[in-house]
Amino acid sequence: MPNARDIESELRAARQDIETLASLAAERAAEVGSAAAAMADERLQNLSEEARKLYGDALGSGKRVRQQAEAKIRDNPLAAAGIAFVVGMLVAAVLGRR
């Protein structure tokens, strides 16, 4: 039958083992967390670069569409005024119903 000293000794050893395991788990969690953070940062940078590229592409497309619309308006000013009048009437009709 174990005596009190043996039980205390085993409890101390168990506590040390638990502390060691907790320390190892914390270190491993920190390593995994650092790796995940680095991966997330890299993905964020890639997305940021893609967003800048898409913004640039959209800006270029918008400028081209605006230039084309301005050219059409200059070539057909009467048609442009008629279209603007019809759109204005439609907007007024929709807003008047509310």
Image (cartoon, grey):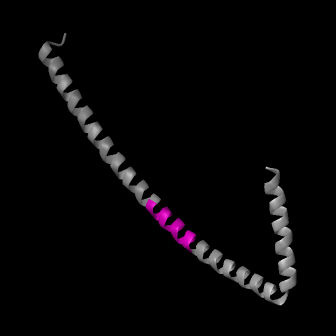
Residue 43 on the magenta span: yes
- Residue 5 sits above or below residue 75 on the image: above
- Residue 82 sits above or below residue 8 on the image: below
Instruction: Residue 20: give x, y in percent of width and height.
Output: 24, 38
- Residue 74 sits above or below residue 89 on the image: below
Q: For the N terminus, give its image quadrant.
A: top left
Instruction: Residue 26: give x, y in percent of width and height.
Output: 31, 43
Give the left or right position of residue 49, taking residue 21 as reference.
right
Give the left or right position of residue 89, taking residue 64 as reference.
right
Instruction: Residue 25: give x, y in percent of width and height.
Output: 33, 41
Give the left or right position of residue 72, taking residue 42 as reference.
right
Residues rendered magenta in the picture = 41-52
The residue located at (83%, 89%) in the rendering is 75
Instruction: Residue 55: give x, y in percent of width and height.
Output: 59, 73
Residue 62 on the magenta span: no
Displayed quadrant of residue 73: bottom right
Instruction: Pick the residue in front: 30 or 25.
Output: 30
Instruction: Pick the residue in front: 88 or 46.
Output: 88
The residue located at (87%, 76%) in the rendering is 82
- Residue 37 sits above or below residue 24 on the image: below
